[in-house]
Each structure stands twice: as C-alpha cells, then as structure tokens.
Image (tube, grey):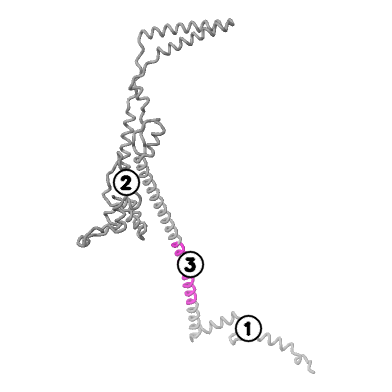
Amino acid sequence: MDAQRALLDELMGAARNLTDEERKGYKEIKWDDKEVCASYMVRFCPHDLFVNTRSDLGPCPRIHDQKLKESFENSPRHDTYVPRFEAELAQFCEKLVADLDRKVRRGRERLDQEVEPPPPPPISAEKAEQLSVLEDKIKNLLEQVESLGEAGKVDEAEALMRKVEILNVEKTALTQQPLSAATMLTQEKKMALCEICGSFLVANDAVERTQSHITGKQHIGYGMVRDFISEYKAAKEKAREEERLAREKDAEERRKQREKESESKNRRSISSERDRHRDREYSRDRERSRDWNNRGNRNDGRGMDRRRHDDYRNGRDGGGRTRNYGRERERSRSRSPVRHGHRR
C-alpha cells in the first residue's frame, strides 16, 4: 500500500486527492524545507539503520522522499547545501557513537569484574595417605629399574617401568578434582564485547554465529555511522590543511610583493637623490659662474686683476698676447735673410 501511494505521489503529486478549497492552503514540500530530513538527502538517516534491533531509534520525525532526494541531487544548489547537511548528520552520529562508547566501557568493566573460578579445595586426608603410599611404591620401583638397568637386565627393567606408569595414572586420578557446573559454564561460555556495536558475544564461538553477528543490521549500521564520522573528520582536516597552505602561500606572495615594492622604492629614492645632487651641483656651478661674471664687470679694479691673473695662468699678457711674444719676434727678425745681407 505504501509503495503504491508513493508511486501515485510521484506520478500525480502529493496533492492529487485534495479539493479545490484544500489546494488553496496547500504548500508543496521542497527538499530545502525544514520538514525534510537533511541526513536522508545527503547520505543516510540513522533512524533507518536500526529498525527492529535493540538499538532501534524509532521512526524519523522528518520526511523521507526519494523524489525530493533526486531533486536535491539535481539542484544547482547541491554543492552549497552538502556541507551543511553533512555537518548536521555528523553531529547526530557523534552523539550516537558517544552514547554507544559509554555502553561499551560499562560492558568492558563488567567483563573485567567477573569473578574467577575459585581454586579447587584441598584433598582429603584419606587421599593424601593413598598418594603417599603410591609415591613410595613409585620411588622403590624406580630404584629397582635403575639397578636392573645397570645389571643389564633390560626385560625386567621394562616390566617394572610399566608398573610405574600404572601407578602414575592412579596418582593423577587422585589429584584431579571434579569440575563444578559453574566452573564448566565459565570455561565454556566466556564472553567478549564487540567494539563496533557494543554487543556481547561468546568468545571462540562458532564461525556461523560470528558471521551472523557481523552481517547483522545493528553491526552494519554502527559500522556505517563510524565510517562516516571518520570520513567526515578526515575531509575536515584535509580542508583545514589546504586552507592553512593557501594562507601561507598568500602570506609568502604578499611578503615577496612587499620586498619587490620596497626594492623599487629604494631604487627610486636613490635615483631621486642622485637627481637632487646633480641639480644642486648644477645650481652651484651656475651660481659660481654668475658670481665670477659679476666680479669681472665691477670697476673697482678687482675684475681687471682677476682677468690679468687668468691671462697670466693661461700664458698671455694683458693684451691677449703670450708673454714670450716680443722675444719670439726678435728671434724671427734675427733669422731674416734680408737682415743678414742675403738679398737677391
């Protein structure tokens, strides 16, 4: 009946049987509504795992609808809502496992506190006397066996050894105590605890019973819950590690950018300082040149002295001629052929 109703809901809609008046106030359920089970949408609902077991959680109070689940999987907002739904499922599963782990600890403490079977009571005085007689007989026979062996009488020694073995069997029967029913039950039914689902098991039980427990609904359900928690934590840890590496990479890139900008700024600063120094030198040279020109144009005689000083340094006299002009002219005249009578 439920399967047929679900099929009709999928084909004709959940509001197929509503009247026109009822349809006015009807609200269509969507996958992102609060009434829909988010755990069922993204993975599994824990309420579905333990039906008809000792860990049965009862029916889920939210809606489970395969059509809504398919709509969620095909929605463009699927990847956005998956982390939120998985976090909600992980929170529920962690609470479930925490309760189970407390149960497992209590069960382990019960097993540890089990009373060991009491030691066997001491043997009676009558049995003690019989044991003493047997031990004396065995001792005497062993001495005789040793003597016969030294004398080379092997057959007689072997016959006595058979008697010694028979006496040892009687001694063992006297020392053994009959086991009580509780002791036998304790040895045969020693309990163990399943760490996955918290169930009590019989240690060293038959393979069929152990396999039946492993394939049981409760064991598989808690295995799924624990696997999901481990997978969820591993994914969160991986995401945190990737985020940390991304932050370190961004910080390294920002550091390199700052160093590059600082280096560029230093180069611009050095270039600006050189330009300023060049401008200062140029201004200083212009001031110096202007000052000399001003001094040369003065009529106080210092300008003429300065020009004479410069001419002297440059090898010229006051008229702009070299200081050796007269001497060179005299030398030229003395070498002239006309002066020495060499006229043609």
Q: Residue at x 55, y 83 (%)?
A: 307
For the magenta stretch, what is the residue range?
Answer: 257-284
Residue 250: x %, y % from top left: 42, 58
Q: Nearer the viewer's eye, disc 2 or disc 3? A: 2
Residue 180: x %, y % from top left: 34, 19
Residue type, numbered disc 2: Asp
Query: Mark 1 Cα within 10 Å, few/some/many (few <14, many 20+)?
Result: some
Would you say residue 37 is visible in this rendering? no
Would you say residue 217 is visible in this rendering? yes
Label located before the other in sequence (2 or 1): 2
List the single residue furthest toward the left: 21
Task: Using the image, tell me which numbered label, if any, was put on residue 323.
Answer: 1
Q: Give the secondary structure at mark 1.
A: loop
Residue 282: x %, y % from top left: 49, 76
Q: Main secondary structure of the magenta part?
A: helix
Q: Which residue is mark 2?
A: 48
Q: Is residue 269 magenta?
A: yes
Determine the CA span between mark 2 and mark 1: 125 Å
User: Viewed as shown, does residue 282 lie left or right of 67?
Assistant: right
User: Viewed as shown, does residue 115 lie left or right of 292?
Assistant: left
Label located before the other in sequence (2 or 3): 2
Label located before the other in sequence (1 or 3): 3
Residue type, numbered disc 3: Arg
Query: Mark 2 Cα within 10 Å, few/some/many (few <14, many 20+)?
Result: some
Up-down relation of residue 212 to residue 20 (above or below):
above
Q: Which residue is mark 3?
A: 267
